[in-house]
Image (cartoon, rainbow, N blue to C red):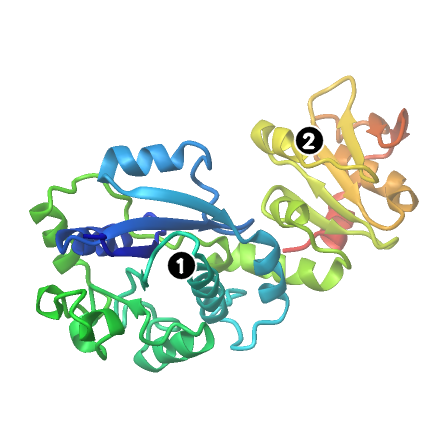
């Protein structure tokens, strides 16, 4: 007898873990899909996460990158943004659409999600759940085991593939029922509840929104750069990022690409700066001055700054005063 298989959207949170285990209790084979982009899902090592999921939960997992598609959603989400720069409804539609397209190739017959009715104010209202199902073309295909008894039966339930009486009717923002279920299932290791998407962070989302308007070409590299350091928009249309500590300096160096200018203080401690734009050389002196303005040599009349682009040179830059730093810096 062929075993029925489902694909589960897997964020790594408790709800998605429980959704998978509830299906396995009914003899359903589950393959979890962990979607990643520049803004969510990258907290886990892509190569090691499947092994970690299997070790902790006995869940077979595949990682799928939707970064480029998510950038297009973020530019212009048909259902708008949440409280910040977070297109939660359209993000869910994107992920479910991609998951639906994986069904045939992975030998699965329906989809599973750990969503809980009423848990999130924008994307998990009853009306929004229906909109997501409709626009992702998964009506009847998507089973939400934790809230199933408060939702319409899916095809898998109607056909007897899944026993609806063994599903749950959880709703609301509380987690007591999920935590109790986790104990019953012997699941003791799971992350604390938290938004896994940086676009729900007030300060970061505001900065990213401003940069999406200011920067003509948005790539995954640019999206990663948006999340590190101090940011400046310079008069020559360049974008400057300045590290705040050694870890950020290393991250900025790792995101350097052809056409950028990479700046470092010579002869003293200071941050790394990266200037990017159509013609970053036009803002080179100002950018070097801003980098110098955050160095330990900022009180000196001039500071030596090495600049690496197509070649490498060292210039003497006047450290930018605090009012100049405020003038060009994004909040």
Q: How far apart, in angstroms, are the residues tagged by discs 2 and 1?
A: 40 Å
- Residue 71 appears left or right of 64: right
Residue 40: where, in percent of width, then height? Answer: 48, 51
Query: x and y percent of residue 310 in the render?
Result: 88, 31
Find residue 23 and report its horizontal and vertical position in percent: 19, 56
| Residue placed furthest toward the bottom | 127
Q: Name the residue at 32% across, 68% down.
A: 142
Q: Is residue 13 visible?
A: no
Q: Is residue 183 toward the left or the right of residue 121 in the image?
A: left
- Residue 167 in sight: yes
Q: Are marks 2 and 1 in contact (CB under 8 Å)?
A: no
Which comes sooner in the sequence, label 2 or label 1?
A: 1
Please name the residue shown 32% across and 63% down the image. Answer: 110
Q: Is residue 272 above or below residue 1?
A: above
Question: Mark 1 packing: few (<14 Cα in 10 Å), some, or many (20+)?
Answer: some
**In this view, 146 is above or below 188:** below
Nearer-the-camera pick, 317 or 261: 261
Q: Which residue is mark 2?
A: 253
Residue at 70% of width from left, 55% of height from top? 218
């Amino acid at each position: 007898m062929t075993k029925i298989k489902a694909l589960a959207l897997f964020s790594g949170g408790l709800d998605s873990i429980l959704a998978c285990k509830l299906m396995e209790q009914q003899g359903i084979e589950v393959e979890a899909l962990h979607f990643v982009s520049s803004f969510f899902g990258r907290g886990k090592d892509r190569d090691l996460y499947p092994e970690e999921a299997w070790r902790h939960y006995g869940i077979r997992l595949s990682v799928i990158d939707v970064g480029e598609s998510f950038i297009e959603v973020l530019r212009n989400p048909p259902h708008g943004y949440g409280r910040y720069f977070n297109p939660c409804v359209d993000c869910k539609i994107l992920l479910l659409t991609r998951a639906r397209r994986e069904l045939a190739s992975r030998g699965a017959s329906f989809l599973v999600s750990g969503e809980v009715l009423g848990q999130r104010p924008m994307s998990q209202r009853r009306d929004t759940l229906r909109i997501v199902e409709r626009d992702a073309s998964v009506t009847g295909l998507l089973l939400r085991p934790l809230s199933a008894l408060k939702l319409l039966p899916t095809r898998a339930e109607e056909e007897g593939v899944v026993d609806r009486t063994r599903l749950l009717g959880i709703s609301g923002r509380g987690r007591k029922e999920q935590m109790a279920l986790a104990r019953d299932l012997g699941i003791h290791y799971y992350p604390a509840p938290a938004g896994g998407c940086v676009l729900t962070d007030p300060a970061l989302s505001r900065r990213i929104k401003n940069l999406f308007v200011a920067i003509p070409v948005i790539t995954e590299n640019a999206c990663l750069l948006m999340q590190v350091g101090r940011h400046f928009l310079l008069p020559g249309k360049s974008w400057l990022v300045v590290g705040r500590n050694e870890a950020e300096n290393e991250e900025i160096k790792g995101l350097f690409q052809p056409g950028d200018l990479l700046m470092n203080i010579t002869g003293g401690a200071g941050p790394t700066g990266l200037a990017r734009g159509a013609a970053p050389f036009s803002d080179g002196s100002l950018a070097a001055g801003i980098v110098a303005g955050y160095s330990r040599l900022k009180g000196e009349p001039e500071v030596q700054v090495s600049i690496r682009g197509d070649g490498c040179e060292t210039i003497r830059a006047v450290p930018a005063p605090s009012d100049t730093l405020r003038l060009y810096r994004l909040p």
